[in-house]
Image (spheres, rainbow, N blue to C red):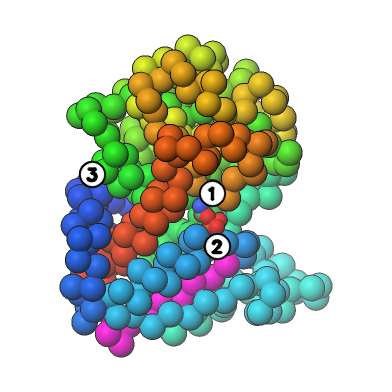
Amino acid sequence: MQHFTSVHDVTNPLGLVQKALSIKKNPFALKALGANKTLGLLFFNSSLRTRMSSQKAATNLGMDVIVMNVTQDSWQIEMEDGVVMDGGTAEHIREAAAVMGQYCDILGVRSFPSLTDREADYNERIINAFKHHSGTPIVSLESATLHPLQSLADLITIAEYKKADKPKVVLTWAPHIKALPQAVSNSFAQWVNKTDYDFTIVQPEGFELKEEFTRGANIAYDQKEAFNGADFIYVKNWSSYNDYGKVGTAKDWLINQEKLAVTNQAKVMHCLPVRRNVVIADDVLDSQSSIVIPQAGNRVYSAQAVFQTLLETHG
Ligand code: CP
């Protein structure tokens, strides 16, 4: 594995899930592997889970960690090539990424989309710039369009909780008050499409994800029908891809216990953070149906499996 920025970077995604499950049984076994190696974690945006789980995963592997909140702690970075830098930006990504690559053996980068310029967002300018200029393996900590560390944790969680070989998994859109990226949902679709699970994505008209990511899934518009017999309900809001960045507030898509009645006692998942009673009701989050906390716990083993694989590949 050269980088970890999408499922396509992984030769055997389901093998990586099994590797993470094995690491979870004995997380400190390879404490020597990361000795004298440094992980850099660069955040252009806020984080709780990704930041803490990545630090913990690296510590479990014996790595040193440098964390930087780029927009607060560093110089303003210029992303455009060929510009006269006489404005607010003081350092170009070409130098910034290359210098960080001198200090770090693996670099993790979190960079959300603008949600105003679809072409720029879907070209993944920032994560690709780090790939091109840092000279070191890059791990996506959630890019403009994908969140593979989250998706790997999601598949680990499904593997732990599934009762059937081929569970019915439903990714459902839910309402929100502001425009959120499509990244978690695009990525979840990419990874679940690598399994043989029965996979449905349900959303209101106008909130379809980009087909590149969803191809292989059943696409539905009736939430109740989609939930019928489901083993897992993965809840997530995303803003519109087609009417780029449009917010969806349809309150009748809120997930509550009443909606779970038609499922096969489905386990409810969400990447967190979640706005209670906007996206998912208290009566679900505080019930046995919810597995959002163990799901977040698995972020450690997802990150650890990825860092371990990169250390094994790159020495
Ligand atoms: N799920 C997730 O990535 O959480 P954070 O944004 O808190 O890192």
Q: Are marks 1 and 3 in contact (CB under 8 Å)?
A: no
Identity of the amino acid at label 3?
A: Leu
SS assignment for the magenta stretch, majority? strand
Identity of the amino acid at label 1?
A: Leu
Q: Nearer the viewer, mark 2 or mark 3?
A: 2
Q: Which mark is residue 52?
A: none
Q: In the displayed image of the protein, which residue is found farthest to the right?
A: 87
- Tell which of 5 and 286 is nearer to you: 286
**Residue labelled with disc 2:** 48
Q: Where is the C terminus found, in terms of image quarters? A: bottom left
Q: Are marks 1 and 2 in contact (CB under 8 Å)?
A: yes
Residue 124 in the magenta stretch? The answer is no
Q: In the displayed image of the protein, which residue is found farthest to the bottom?
A: 36
Q: Position of residue 283 (x, y in %)?
A: 56, 34
Residue at the location (65% across, 79% down)? 74
As measured in the structure, the alpha-carbon distance from the residue carrying label 1 to the one carrying label 2 is 9 Å
**Residue labelled with disc 3:** 14
Earlier in the chain: of badge 2 and badge 3, it is: 3
CB of residue at label 1: within 8 Å of ligand 1?
Answer: yes
- 69 relative position to 202: left or right: right
CB of residue at label 2: within 8 Å of ligand 1?
Answer: yes
As measured in the structure, the alpha-carbon distance from the residue carrying label 2 to the one carrying label 3 is 26 Å
Earlier in the chain: of badge 1 and badge 2, it is: 2
| Range shown magenta | 34-43
Earlier in the chain: of badge 1 and badge 3, it is: 3
Q: Which mark is residue 272?
A: 1
As measured in the structure, the alpha-carbon distance from the residue carrying label 1 to the one carrying label 3 is 23 Å
**In the image, residue 240 above or below residue 224:** below
Q: Position of residue 247 (x, y in %)?
A: 72, 34
